[in-house]
Amino acid sequence: SRWAVLGATAIFINVGAEVAIGTQKALFLNTPGIWGVSLEQAGKAVSFYWGGAMIGRAIGTVLLARFPATRLMALFATIAAAMCAYVMIVGGVSAGYVALAIGLFNSIMFPVIFTLTLERSTASEEATSGLLCTGIIGGAAIPALAGAVTDATSFVASFIVPATCYVLLVLFAMRA
């Protein structure tokens, strides 16, 4: 099913963007000009990124009961892309806080992609679910790409990778 493949690609992109930000967050916050804090303090702050995803999931559940999932996902992905752009363009201490807040907007993407894909796929639910779960490998591939961008440029510039992912997720939501 074309939708099963699109959904697995969206899961690949979503998990990849989420993990790409999370894996580099402590080093990003440690960077002089961002927060410049110790790696220990930066590592502790990363919990706010993942905690934001948990809080966002609770808020998202309420919002999903009131608004169409496709529109909410498009909105959340647009906000996440804009936040990545803020980090790259503005930088500084505020960029550290904005980068941590991206977790709030990652919150609903995985379950919405999963549900939208199951609703639209012509393949069996079992086959579609299996393919969607395979898409999680994006959590290994995209962070490696973000790391390569970091090595070539900077932690700030590497936010172009998740920003691009979020733009692609907006397109997925609009297509759905």
Image: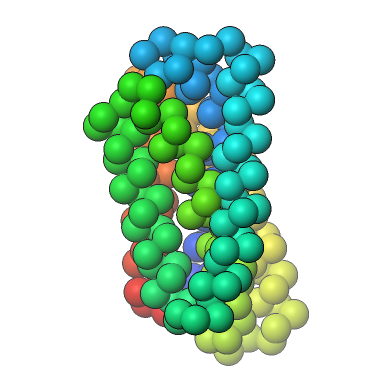
Q: Say if residue 165 shows up in the picture.
A: yes
Point out residue 138 in the picture as x, y percentages from the top left corner.
Answer: 58, 49
Q: Say if residue 1 shows up in the picture.
A: no
* Quadrant into which the N terminus falls: bottom right
Left or right of residue 82, residue 20 in this image: right
Left or right of residue 27, residue 99 in this image: left
User: Which corner quadrant of the image does residue 42 belong to?
Assistant: top right
> Image height check: is 1 above or below 90?
below
Residue ranking furthest to the bottom: 122
Point out residue 55 in the picture as x, y percentages from the top left corner.
Answer: 62, 54
> Image height check: is 69 above or below 149?
below
* Quadrant into which the C terminus falls: bottom left
Residue ranking furthest to the right: 126
Q: Nearer the viewer, residue 56 or 2?
A: 56
Query: Residue at (37%, 30%) from the top-left corner?
Result: 95
Query: Residue at (65%, 53%) from the top-left corner?
Result: 54
Point out residue 74 in the picture as x, y percentages from the top left corner.
Answer: 38, 67
> Image height check: is 26 above or below 73?
above
> Image height check: is 130 above or below 88?
below
Q: Nearer the viewer, residue 31 or 59?
A: 59
| Coloring applied to the structure | rainbow
Count of numbered circles in the view: 0
Query: Residue at (61%, 61%) from the top-left corner?
Result: 57
Q: Nearer the viewer, residue 133 or 69?
A: 69
Query: Residue at (58%, 47%) from the top-left corner?
Result: 52
Left or right of residue 157, residue 8 in this image: right
Point out residue 127 in the picture as x, y percentages from the top left corner.
Answer: 70, 78
